[in-house]
Image (tube, rainbow, N blue to C red):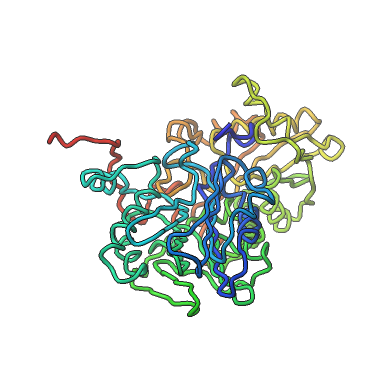
Amino acid sequence: MFGQKEACNMDKVKEECGVFGILDPEGGSVAHSIYYGLTALQHRGQEACGIVTSDTSGPVGNYHCRKNAGLVSEVFHENSLKSLPGNLGIGHVRYSTTGGSRPENAQPLAISYIKGTLALAHNGNLVNTADLKWELVRNGAVFHTTTDSEVIAFYLARERVHTQTIQEAVLATARKLSGSYALVIMSPQKLIGLRDPYGLKPLCLGKRGNAYILASESCALSAVDAEFIRDVEPGEMVTLSEKGIESDRSLQTGRCAHCIFEYIYFARLDSRLDGINVYDARIAAGRSLARSHPVAADLVTGVPESGLPAAKGFALESGIPFGFAFYKNSYIGRTFIKPSQAERESGVHLKLSVLAATVKGKRIVLVDDSIVRGTTMKNLVQMLKDAGASEVHVRISSPPFRHPCYFGTDVPSEEELIANRLSMDGICRMLGADSLGYLDLKALPEMVKGLLICSGCFDNHYPMEIPEPKPFPFWCGE
């Protein structure tokens, strides 16, 4: 079913999307490359995916589109990839925040209009969607999805009617947008990448032979045997065509705010974002935890998979041995039956089991990247103690979640966040842990070597003004 999640991932925040685009000026088919690139980005979204392709030497208006709910490997097979010919294409994997889990919200969005065809894939979340959408509706626009991405597509088409080039239309549209966005846009002849002025969402540029590639993370470039060229800069638009690479930096403001949770959890371990290796950032977070929250223990372990690098960093700094305390069952699917709330809350047992011989009689440091509601961590602590651990000390490689994210991270409401409901001692008691320590806010810049970051979900300081939420449709009384 569309939007169904794994029970053991209930207590994790989710990223919205991943994007991928490729142009082969020599005319080679790109569908398979997009498939491999999206597979490498699958961690960024598991609800739906899609691919749009076209032939830059074909007739005006030609494009081929396939998208549906499900994983990349479920939606696409050899025959479906053969039905996507062309040397230019974009792809998308989706986890919903804005718009919700509806099949029609799958991307990329492809449209035909007076100037030809246009397709786009979007990672991020706009904060002024309601105002933009109302302006369009008042002028006769009809929407088929509930996403902010469709609003962007409408503005692109409208601006393109009045501009000489697609690049001018993209820039004119971007000046109306507030929020986070990493976009890949496909016109009949060009592939365009655009990143919001704060650089909240990642986007990088690569090359394989004479083919150019845009992707949310560098791990997707490796998946198609492409060379990493560089990150697309915050506020930069890159245009890829037969002429090569063109860059426009007119949207840049010099005020960056990269999402810190990319480095804590979202990005794949082997990716490099804005000059920072994700693995190194997570090791640094674990080291910082060991310095600020030391404890006498016999073994440091992490929650698979996201807690393992920080656990390794904690072990390196503290001198306590690192080891594996859990076996992860990789064969539990996304849609196994979860008929009751009680079974959902205990579903972690289906995917993780304790290596009892490793933990029995030992004092354990258990490291994870975050605590949202606390349900999963409570179960893990109990599992370790049931297996004979004498003590369990929980360490978290991020500060406490206290505030919403407006930029594409699916953080639950403040009322659901355990750090807003309980004190630190209260959280520790609820988890059944012997001690609890979070990463200090001041350690975040050190974690990413001074990179300018957005940490609003931790400290309520956002890089832009967040307008009051407005329902849509909202009526002005006319």
Q: In which quarter of the image is residue 221?
A: bottom right
What residue is shown at x 55% (from left), y 74% (from top)? Answer: 25
The picture places residue 264, in percent across and down from the top left corner, at 57, 53
Q: Residue furthest left?
A: 478
Closest to the observer, 238 or 28 = 28
The picture places residue 32, in percent across and down from the top left corner, at 65, 59
Q: Which residue lies furthest to the right in this view?
A: 357
Q: Can residue 20 be seen in this view?
A: yes
What residue is shown at x 49% (from left), y 31% (from top)? Answer: 422
Left or right: 407 with respect to 392?
A: left
The picture places residue 50, in percent across and down from the top left corner, at 55, 49
Q: In which quarter of the image is residue 200?
A: bottom left
What residue is shown at x 40% (from left), y 53% (from top)? Answer: 111
Q: Quadrant of residue 196?
A: bottom left
In the rendered view of the protein, which quadrant contains the N terminus? Answer: top right
Closest to the observer, 67 or 441 = 67
